[in-house]
Image: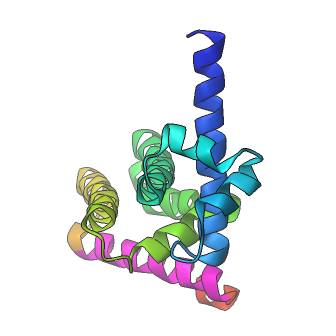
Amino acid sequence: MTKSEATSVNRKSEIISAAIEVFAEIGYYRATTAQVATRAKISQPYIFRFFSTKEALLLAALEVSWTRVIDSFRKVVESAAPEQLETDLIQAYDDILNAYQNEILLQMQAQTIQEDSIREAMRNGFGEVRRMVIDAFRAASIPNPEERTMLFLARGMLCNISIALNMPELKER
């Protein structure tokens, strides 16, 4: 990779990070690419060098957030002892909530956006997480893997709500 290509990749990542922050703070619909550019310390037209629309930028941000969750869960699935699997997955998600709160807030907002491409990205992300967890629970011989997966996902959503509403008591075990 040339220095120019590396700079371009870094700048694209910086724009996505800025977009995640701005979208999480003020909402996708209220946010502008000008605000994202200001946060990224670049000019607004420079954003359009990488992303043709604000929606394309949101899709890239969602991809980053889902990849983080999926990669984190994959590491747990590959390394956890069967009896620790669920506990380790919960801890991995809690770590994501603590370190990448804006990404989770972004996902929560995206659940309500009706554009087909956004809905598809959210379905794909949730679907991949669900498949990974249910397959791991089955492989670990966890009883009632479908129900346990549903409860695991429901708990994750409750954790998201606890973060969004600043109600830590919803996360208490």
Q: How many marks?
A: 0
Q: By what rule are the colours in the image chosen?
A: rainbow
**Horizontal and vertical percent position of residue 131:** 25, 56
**Horizontal and vertical percent position of residue 122:** 34, 64
For the point 58% across and 77% down, the residue is 30
Q: Is 160 inside the magenta-drawn segment?
A: yes
User: Is residue 76 shown above or below 29?
Assistant: above
Q: Residue furthest top?
A: 2
Q: Is 42 inside the magenta-drawn segment?
A: no
Q: Is residue 172 visible?
A: no
In this orientation, which residue lies closer to the viewer: 66 or 14?
A: 14
Q: Residue furthest front?
A: 45
- Magenta residues, start to end: 147-165
**Horizontal and vertical percent position of residue 71:** 46, 44
Q: Is residue 39 left or right of residue 6?
A: right
Q: Is residue 20 visible?
A: yes
Q: Is residue 70 left or right of residue 16?
A: left
Q: Quadrant of the N terminus?
A: top right
Q: Quadrant of residue 113?
A: bottom left
For the point 57% across and 76% down, the residue is 27
User: Is residue 26 shown above or below 42?
Assistant: below
Q: Quadrant of residue 18?
A: bottom right
Q: Is residue 171 left or right of residue 133?
A: right
**Horizontal and vertical percent position of residue 58:** 47, 58
Q: Quadrant of the C terminus?
A: bottom right
For the point 60% across and 66% down, the residue is 32
In this orientation, which residue lies closer to the viewer: 82 or 75?
A: 75
Q: Quadrant of residue 7?
A: top right
In this orientation, which residue lies closer to the viewer: 157 or 33?
A: 33
What secondary structure predominates along the stretch shown in magenta? helix
For the point 69% across and 62% down, the residue is 35
